[in-house]
Image: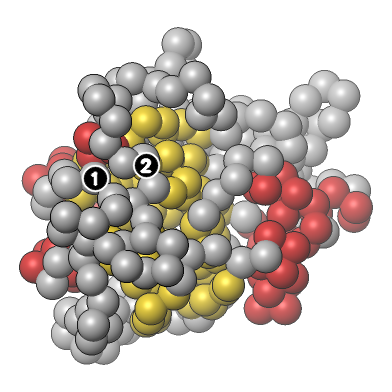
Amino acid sequence: MLKQGARTGRGGVPLSFRTIAYNVLECTGFPDGAPAHMVTPAAFAEALAGYAPDVVTLAECPERESVLAVAAHLEMACVFFPSAERWPGALLTRLPLLAAENCPHPSGVRPAADFTRHWGRALLLAGGGDGGGAEVVAVHSVHLHPSDGATREREVLAVLEAVRADREAGARVVVQGDLNHRPDMPEYEWWWNGGLYDTFEPEDPGEGYTYRSDIPMARLDYIWVDRELAPRVVRGRPLAEPPFVPTEEHPWALSDHIPQLAVIEPPRGQVGPGRLDSDVR
């Protein structure tokens, strides 16, 4: 449910924000043996800050104190999403936070076999400065099961049911994270059929691979938005640049995954998917 009194911005100031989804491998660096100074909370924060995000979701987080340190360096609020096993998540944001919930399963409880990594949801207020005329955005941070297709199917369908409820309540919706499937797998079509839009825009010559950072081989990390937000997407790409990927001079990356960025802006002429603003990094 939306917080009582929250306004969805019909006729108001449309939202504008940048969001990043990143599996951080417990902030240990990749491959093993990364120099200690490279994998500090400050190092992660500095790398992310270069893209001026308003929202960052993290998968496979380290202990809560390290995540809070990253958020402090970025001057962001932090919501920690505990895991049923050992893969917690988090959402960091500079936007007003209305509410947050860990594993907002439609049944009201987390099924024992599902969402063993993490699923969390936060309601944010974007676009209005003081809140007047702003839009409520439901951001779902999701890390799906890596190997069991039947479990992943249940997880996707549960998230889509929660997304429908958010949209019916008047919120805009973003679903992002390590979804552990490729675009050629059935799960990809389920997101599309559920009314979501893949923000990734292919760039020559890239395939958008987000795993692994040293030998890119698969696109597993995504940022999906609802169809109302889709025309506002002006950029969607993996951040395949140091220190998110290793180089010959610096043979370590911050994680085995590459973060995914999406930039969503107010309607401006014909700007939309497939057309990139020159000032968007």
The spot of residue 142 in percent (x, y) is: 38, 62
Crowding at dot 2, Cα within 10 Å, few <14 / some 14-19 / many 20+, comes out as many
Q: Residue at x 82, y 32 (%)?
A: 251
Q: CA distance from mark 2 to mark 1?
A: 7 Å
What's the amino acid at mark 1?
Leu
Q: Helix, strand or loop at disc 1?
A: loop
On the image, which quarter does residue 170 sit in? bottom left
Q: Is residue 143 left or right of residue 48?
A: left
Mark 2 or mark 1: name the one nearer the start of the chain: 1
Q: Is residue 255 left or right of residue 165?
A: right
Crowding at dot 1, Cα within 10 Å, few <14 / some 14-19 / many 20+, comes out as many
The spot of residue 31 in percent (x, y) is: 75, 43
Examine the rendered structure and indicate whether residue 41 appears above or below residue 64: above
Examine the rendered structure and indicate whether residue 260 appears above or below residue 66: above
Q: Residue at x 32, y 67 (%)?
A: 132
Q: Nearer the viewer, residue 83 or 136?
A: 136
Query: Quadrant where the N terminus lies?
Result: bottom left
Q: Is residue 140 visible?
A: no
What's the amino acid at mark 2?
Ile
Q: Is residue 121 left or right of residue 18?
A: left
Q: Nearer the viewer, residue 279 or 28?
A: 279
Q: Are marks 2 and 1 in contact (CB under 8 Å)?
A: yes
Query: Quadrant where the C terminus lies?
Result: top right
**Which residue is denoted by mark 1 in the rendering?**
229
**Which residue is denoted by mark 2 in the rendering?**
264
